[in-house]
Amino acid sequence: DAKTTQPTSMDCAEGRAANLPCNHSTISGNEYVYWYRQIHSQGPQYIIHGLKNNETNEMASLIITEDRKSSTLILPHATLRDTAVYYCIVTQTGANNLFFGTGTRLTVIP
Amino acid sequence: EPEVTQTPSHQVTQMGQEVILRCVPISNHLYFYWYRQILGQKVEFLVSFYNNEISEKSEIFDDQFSVERPDGSNFTLKIRSTKLEDSAMYFCASNNPPGWSSGNTIYFGEGSWLTVV
């Protein structure tokens, strides 16, 4: 699986959009970008994933650059409950496991 | 929304004792996993299980560990003789193979916190 690079930590004001970047310059053509988050040692929670097109669901939007070497997870209106560690994971569909890095610790500030 | 459930949420055990952590994966899923997270460290893959056998395991998953699907709904992780360094949060997860209409996203349970004293 391709390696990802994320900032260690970020802050975001409550109600503003949180934009979490991820670099995955060695991504291969059959690898997807997945985002999970972990709130205070709870189980990792799936957020969104994509291959090359931008994706949106009820939780977030995922913007993938045209060359697929980086992506941004957008939480459109961050709330205090979005404070968590966010993991960007690149993996082949059907891969048997996920490799978690250290992620980005997002703190939403009132 | 279907979810992965785990029991117990927290267990304290004496070093050398056997521990069984239990999981009920999402009902129509066919792949099952165990991950662990030592306090302050990364989430680490332990083992995946499909069609009643281990499909992949990490270096962490040594002979002290075993997994079983004893019936149609439960998936268990057994640690035969616990060590202090086994203290961690253990997460169960499940998904379907690629190509299923429901997708093959891996979903995690809330974890079982194991403390070995």
Image (cartoon, rainbow, N blue to C red):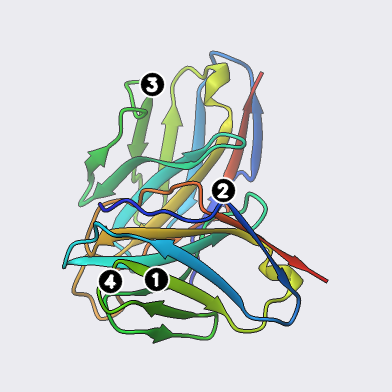
| Disc 1 residue crowd, few under 14, some 14–19, many 20+, Cα 10 Å | many
- Left/right of residue A48 with respect to residue A10 in the rendered view: left
> Do the residues indicated by labels 2 and 1 lie within the same chain of the protein?
no
Helix, strand or loop at label 3? It is: loop
Residue B66 coordinates in the image, percent (x, y): 35, 31
The residue identified by callout 3 is B64
- Left/right of residue A94 with respect to residue A42 in the rendered view: left
Q: Are marks 3 and 2 in contact (CB under 8 Å)?
A: no
Q: Are marks 1 and 4 in contact (CB under 8 Å)?
A: yes
The amino acid sitting under disc 1 is Ser
Is B75 above or below relative to B99? above
- Left/right of residue B115 with respect to residue B80 in the rendered view: right
The residue identified by callout 2 is B111
The amino acid sitting under disc 3 is Gln
Residue B26 in view in this figure: no
Helix, strand or loop at label 4? It is: loop
- Please identify, in this view, whether the residue under mark 4 or under mark 3 is nearer the observer: 4
Which of the labelled discs sits on residue A71, or is there none? 1
Helix, strand or loop at label 1? It is: strand
Q: CA distance from mark 3 to mark 1?
A: 40 Å
Q: CA distance from mark 2 to mark 1?
A: 29 Å
Q: Which of the chains bears the disc numbered 1?
A: A
